[in-house]
Image (spheres, rainbow, N blue to C red):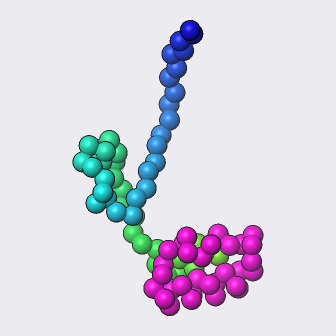
Amino acid sequence: GVTYNMSMKCKMFETSNSKKKLSKPVRSRFQEYHLPEYSDDEYIEVVKYCLAEKITLTTAEIIAKILLAQERKDVREEI
């Protein structure tokens, strides 16, 4: 058979909402960054951006405000 020896430069980014279930050996291979939660205004803008091609910005803003009122500040929920 043919053997290939390859090398490539790449970066990996992994995300997690909680590190409780990540083992210490796995965590030791990554740098940890802690990002603050979106402010309410930032959350509304992100929702509007994500939905801009699907619905009007006014409707997207209404959806974002309803989710905020229900204390559901997860951008994945608006989809």
Please state, as top left, top right, bottom left or bottom right, where the C terminus lies in the image: bottom right
At 39% from the left edge and 64% from the top edge, which residue is drawn? 17
Query: Does residue 44 sit above or below 18 in this rendering?
Result: below
Q: Position of residue 24 (x, y in %)?
A: 24, 48
Q: Position of residue 19 (x, y in %)?
A: 31, 58
Please indicate, yes or no, whether residue 7 appears anywhere in the rendered image. yes
Please state, as top left, top right, bottom left or bottom right, where the N terminus lies in the image: top right
What main secondary structure does the magenta stretch of the protein show? helix
Q: Nearer the viewer, residue 6 or 1?
A: 1
Check residue 14 for magenta coloring.
no
Q: Position of residue 9 (x, y in %)?
A: 50, 31
At 51% from the left edge and 16% from the top edge, which residue is drawn? 5
Please indicate, yes or no, whether residue 45 appears anywhere in the rendered image. no
Considering every residue shown, the one lying at the far front of the view is: 1
Q: Position of residue 25 (x, y in %)?
A: 26, 43
Considering every residue shown, the one lying at the far top of the view is: 1
Q: Nearer the viewer, residue 72 or 13?
A: 72
Q: Quadrant of residue 54?
A: bottom right
Query: Does residue 76 sit above or below 2 in this rendering?
Result: below
At 36% from the left edge and 56% from the top edge, which residue is drawn? 33
Query: Does residue 11 sit above or below 44 in this rendering?
Result: above
Q: Which residues are magenta?
A: 50-79
Query: Does residue 66 sit above or below 16 in this rendering?
Result: below
Q: In the image, 65: left or right of 14?
A: right
